[in-house]
Amino acid sequence: MLRAFMLIVLISCSHQVRISSPAISENRKFHEAFSKNEMVTSQGKGTTEAALEVFKKGGNIIDAFVAASFAISVERPHSTGIGGGGFLLYYSKKENKVYAFDFREVAPMSAVTNMFLTKKGDTQPLLSQEGALAVATPGLVKGLYEIHKRFGKLSWEETMRPSIRLAREGFPLYKQLHEALIDRKNLLLLDPEAKKTFYLDSGSVPKLGSLVIQENLAKTLEVISINGATGFYEGKIANSIVKTINKKRGLLSHRDLKTYKMIERVPVTGIYKGLKIYSMPPPSSGGVHVIQILKMLEPYKLKELGPQTAEAVHLTANAMQRAFLDRATYLGDPDFNKIPTQSLVDENYIEKLSQTINTPNAMKESSLKKIELPYESTDTTHFTIADREGNLVASTQTINGWFGSGVIAEGTGIILNNEMDDFAQKVGAKNLFGAVGGEFNLIEPRKRPLSSMSPTIITKNDSPVMALGSPSGTRIITCVAQTILNSVEFEMPLYEAVAATRIHQQWQPDVLKIESPFLDPQVESELKIKGHKVIHEKLGCSIQAIRKNHHGWEGVSDPRGEGLAKGLN
């Protein structure tokens, strides 16, 4: 990524504000597209092309969703895969309805609450991040199959052809995958199949541009294309998964695989500036807190302050902190605990939260206290798709950390997730992304771990406006909220709304993270005077957004990454 600055001059009231964002003008043609018909934005060229290929064959938006899901599993093996899970929001224009589907991984039946603790009760983070004990039951294939069976138009086999071809013919090794292979080299070289697939015989990482071929994964995808979800959850592939896990002393069993169920849920909703926001409900915390952040900030008229001014950033950081305190306090799997979802997005409750964020100085995590709720009877990838009929898809999928658990099911090419790390090892413990775990997110058999994935769809007067989402753990919530703020509150063009420099504050640790290129030095100085502990850190978000305009769709794939926005005309 180039580190130069792109200065966008926005006139807000009577003053001018300079907006910092990555200048990637020579690549803008790959990251921005306009179309009257179908539009796809994803983190991979092959993935975007796979979805468009299915559209060209007469497929509908769900066929394209399935094609993209399998293709991204091939193209971003460090981020997602059929050994993981995810969420889908699907807006049906004809029904004027948003569906929410949860195909998140679940804890094995043999899992116990203290499985990662020492006898003294100390946490052991590596046990939930690397190796077979870190693996939860994958849900991706079951979710895709059942959603396609209900809404798809083309044959299941037809939707999978692009991904099989991509796995067999390969794709050029790109920068982020190259970085992930370096980062996880010591873990992956312990696995013979991982070494053979991703490394040279010497154990070195191949050069950028080298062809990445996954023949075993191609064979696995062929089996699934013929036999459907059964081809993954039963038979030879299931045998290989369980055998590998048992050999490495993990917990996943045949019964775990065979009994996995996708769940249809009710989206969490909120009204922001006359727009209806739909997002993912628990066990994702994302939707609740995207809505909380937006609505806490709504009364403060940030546009008059100006984007990336010290006061606007200060209020936004405070709203983020407040939301993350609620995340640690109240969120978890609603099938195991009573999660107060509606109370958390209730107008009166958010009004109380909003009043607490207007402070002269930075809010300190040690002084923040939860506000009692009224009684009521928690590394990834994302893609967004729109079609000519006005339907929208926003889907976030993951195997959690780079290359998940580092365990590959023998002979299958399936990289298994390390989703057990998204549970709390004990109350107050932190996971890979530094998120604090609460009581509702403790490990239990068949429980789904708390997530930050935030696929989001926005409508106005029963018509589609926007769909978006991002990878990057807890930062997903703040990156999605800021993109909506940039687009709606500050009225930025979509490309600039996605590209603008982002901040992140998640209560604990009590620091304000600002990504490169940084904010104006004077702004950062003012934030420090207010008591914010400013650090500079890459946030890892990669927003994939589509917005309706007068001529059709505008699509933007975050210029920070290797993605592709492309439409059909």
Image (tube, grey):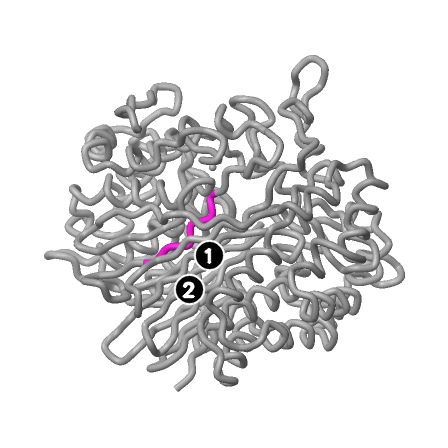
Q: Nearer the viewer, residue 303 or 115?
A: 115
User: Element under label 1?
Assistant: strand
Q: Which secondary structure type mostly characterizes the magenta part of the structure?
A: loop
At label 1, the amino acid type is Leu
Identify the residue position indicated by label 2 in the image. 393
Residue 172 in view of the camera: no
Q: Position of residue 19 (x, y in %)?
A: 31, 58
Q: Residue at x 69, y 73 (%)?
A: 164
Q: Residue at x 47, y 33 (%)?
A: 332
Identify the residue position indicated by label 1 in the image. 88
Question: CB under 8 Å between callouts 2 and 1?
Answer: yes
Q: Position of residue 388 (x, y in %)?
A: 35, 78
Q: Position of residue 223 (x, y in %)?
A: 74, 67
Residue 368 in view of the camera: yes
Q: Residues within 10 Å of mark 1 (few under 14, many from 20)?
A: many
Left or right position of 195 against 480:
right
Q: Residues within 10 Å of mark 2 (few under 14, many from 20)?
A: many
User: Element under label 2?
Assistant: strand
At label 2, the amino acid type is Val
Q: CA distance from mark 2 to mark 1?
A: 7 Å
Inspect the magenta stretch and tell me whether residue 338 lies in it.
Answer: no
Give residue 397's mark. Answer: none
Q: Residue at x 52, y 30 (%)?
A: 441
Range of residues picked out in magenta: 452-457
* Label 2 or label 1, whichever comes before in sequence order: 1
List the single residue furthest toward the right: 201
